[in-house]
Image (spheres, rainbow, N blue to C red):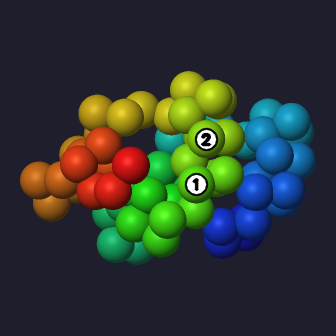
Amino acid sequence: MWAGNAEVLAERLKEGALVDWGARRDGNPPLHHAVFRCHKAVVQLLLGAGAKVDEVNDGEAPEVCGF
């Protein structure tokens, strides 16, 4: 798992990983986790790869959570 590591995520994306590959146990997609944890480089990679910014979980979308 990449867990906030931008270099690992970049490699996974090159290998064809999907940016919105599904929610984790808490229901949040990867972009939510990156925003909540202030992983700016990861947020940029996910957005550049087409992550959905309007994905909502528990009434929150990532664009209102910090960036």
Residue 47 sits in quarter: top right
| Circles 1, 2 touching at the beta carbon (< 8 Å) | yes
Q: Quadrant of the N terminus?
A: bottom right
What numbered label is drawn on residue 32? Answer: none
Residue 17 sits in quarter: top right
Q: Position of residue 55 (x, y in %)?
A: 30, 40
What numbered label is drawn on residue 40? Answer: 1
Question: Which structural element holds mark 1?
Answer: helix
Q: State the residue in front, 53 or 24.
A: 53
Residue sitting at x 40%, y 66%: 36
Residue sitting at x 33%, y 56%: 66
Image position of 37 with respect to 6: above or below: below
On screen, residue 49 versus residue 22, left or right, reads right
Q: State the residue in front, 67 or 60.
A: 67
Mark 1 neighbour density, 10 Å: few (under 14) some (14–19) many (20 or more): some
The answer to whether residue 13 shows anywhere in this view is yes
Question: Which structural element holds mark 2?
Answer: helix
The kind of residue tagged 1 is: Lys
On screen, residue 61 versus residue 10, left or right, reads left
The kind of residue tagged 2 is: Gln
On screen, residue 27 versus residue 22, left or right, reads left
CA–CA distance in space, label 1 to label 2: 6 Å
Exactly how many numbered labels are in the figure?
A: 2
Residue under label 2, please give it.
44
Q: Position of residue 65 (x, y in %)?
A: 28, 56
Q: Position of residue 22 (x, y in %)?
A: 47, 50
